[in-house]
Image (tube, rainbow, N blue to C red):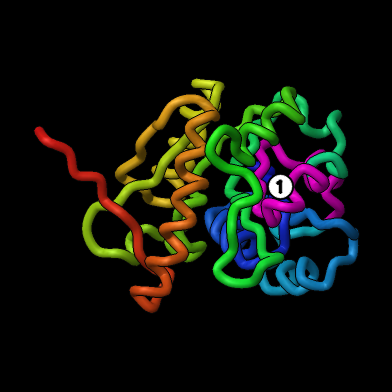
Amino acid sequence: MKIAVLGTGMVGETIASKLVSLGHEVKMGSRSANNEKAAAWVKKAGPKASQGTFAEASSFGEILFNCTSGSGSIEALEAAGRQNLRGKILVDIANPLEFTKGMPPTLFVSNNDSLGERIQRAFPELKVVKTLNTINASVMVEPGRLPGAHAVFVSGNDVEAKGQVKQILEGWFGWKEIIDLGDITTSRGTESYLLLWLRLWGALGTPEFNIHIVKKG
């Protein structure tokens, strides 16, 4: 499959590298066609890896992964071009983190809205599925790094798109516990969880952790 990964940071590189290792063709998108981080990744990742602008990557990909910073996600998708987004699934991993006040960051949208919803409203031609935003990049693509059962969540309006993303999570990345929270408004919950996630990181001394949902039988 041809896949676009938008973003050149740790999350983008981790997702893109995993997808290439599975045999997919991956184009990493950024603001410029000659982005240095993207070029370094392409050199490491091999012949199935390529780079380009947000528009070039989005045109190339049959499915898109949004691994940009939350504050730049809308701008990146605008740069991608609506003609290159129409009808495609966007796996939205971004979080609305605000760093202007230092660490730990706050959220620039919460409570009655979410970044996932803003993206879906701004780009109704996309099928936005929010997932993987509650865990560290290394765990996203290799849940077996952690012992025992632990959960990943999906939110989105399009049932078929969520079904395809669930297949990716299970078949490509190895997730066993996938919880469908409902429509895209439920991404308010997973994005808000980042406030707790960041504090847990500080308390545990590592970002490699996750949660397991226990319910009464």
Label 1 CA crowd tier, 10 Å (few <14, some 14–19, many 20+): many
The residue drawn where x is 55% and y is 23% is 157
Q: Give the quarter of the figure containing the N terminus.
A: top right
Q: Residue at x 77, y 71 (%)?
A: 37
Residue 132 x %, y %:
49, 49
Q: Say which element carries label 1.
A: strand
Q: Residue at x 35, y 36 (%)?
A: 179
Return the x and y of residue 105 as percentages of the image width and height: 59, 64
From the viewer's side, name the closer residue of 135 and 188. 188
Q: Which residue is mark 1?
A: 4
Residue 100 locus on image (x, y percent):
71, 65
Query: Where residue 151 sits: x, y (%)?
Result: 33, 47
Number of numbered discs on residues:
1
> Outermost residue, bottom direction?
205
Magenta span includes 53: yes
Using the rendered view, name the quadrant where residue 201 is placed.
bottom left
Reply above or below: 13 against 89. below
Q: Nearer the viewer, residue 166 or 48?
A: 166
Q: What's drawn in magenta, residue-wise?
A: 52-76
- Who's the residue at 64% across and 27% down the image? 127
- Image-based side of 90 in relation to 61, left or right: left
In the image, is residue 99 above or below residue 83? below
Answer whether residue 26 is visible to the viewer in this image. no
